[in-house]
Amino acid sequence: ETGVTQTPRHLVMGMTNKKSLKCEQHLGHNAMYWYKQSAKKPLELMFVYSLEERVENNSVPSRFSPECPNSSHLFLHLHTLQPEDSALYLCASSQVYGGDRGWSNEKLFFGSGTQLSVL
Amino acid sequence: AQKITQTQPGMFVQEKEAVTLDCTYDTSDPSYGLFWYKQPSSGEMIFLIYQGSYDQQNATEGRYSLNFQKARKSANLVISASQLGDSAMYFCAMRALNYQLIWGAGTKLIIKP
């Protein structure tokens, strides 16, 4: 059983569809992340759930909606996406230690990603 | 502003040779951490090595070592005795505040048999 599991591996959707990406971590970590990886661009952090706190990148459009029902599961709900949202979406987890800076030196463990194509 | 620069978009290296992947960073924070990740064609990001800004010695993990030159703000990854399975994208990243990792654009490494 791999540490971080993402489903589906591939997703093709129309701009009017609603779909969800799922992530599950089996590492006992207390933080989970959604990253977007577009071609020829650095990885972009979209959302973080850590220590019962949610941190989000203010540049992420509202058509992306995260949900974290517990420390092991993370979802990314998608609705009315645009073709420019086509990318690889990576989930990650890590162990975060408390502090007012959200600081952690622990490495991230990533899933294999969901390759999303929006038509 | 915090920034990671990887100046080599792609590299070809002969199998069994050593390879150095460049990474320079910019930060005003005295305490930071630097990471290298590998991303094979399967998509998963795989952690390779970590260097803390206060670490006295260069980090090593098996065939991977990090050539950390603090004054020059560089954190180059060195892979000794490259193997065909090392062909992948390699990303340098720096720990920033608020759970952020600042990522470089990556270097595509191809190992030739």
Image (spheres, coloured by chain):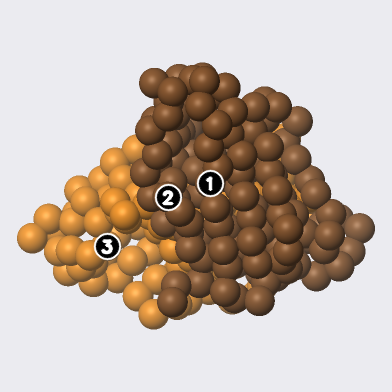
Chain colours: A brown, B orange
- Mark 1 and mark 2 in contact? Answer it, CB < 8 Å: yes
Q: Chain of mark 1?
A: A
Q: Is residue B70 visible?
A: no
Q: Secondary structure at mark 2?
A: loop
Q: Nearer the viewer, mark 3 or mark 2?
A: 2
Determine the CA span between mark 1 and mark 3: 29 Å
Compared across the picture, whether B28 is left or right of B33 comes to right
- The local crowd at label 3, few if under 14, some if 14 to 19, many if 20 or more residues have their Cα within 10 Å, is some
Which label lies toward us, 1 or 3?
A: 1
* Picture residue at 86% right of the left edge, 67% below the top: A98
* Residue at the spot of label 2: A8
Q: Nearer the viewer, residue B106 or A115?
A: A115
Q: Which residue is most to the front?
A: A17
Q: Earlier in the sequence, mark 1 or mark 2?
A: 2
Instruction: Tell me residue A28's x, y (percent).
Output: 66, 76
**Left or right: B29, with B82 as reference point:** right
Vertical relation: A79 (above or below) B15 = above
Q: Which mark is residue A21?
A: 1
| Of the pair A36 and B32, the residue shown nearer to us | A36
Q: Secondary structure at mark 1?
A: strand
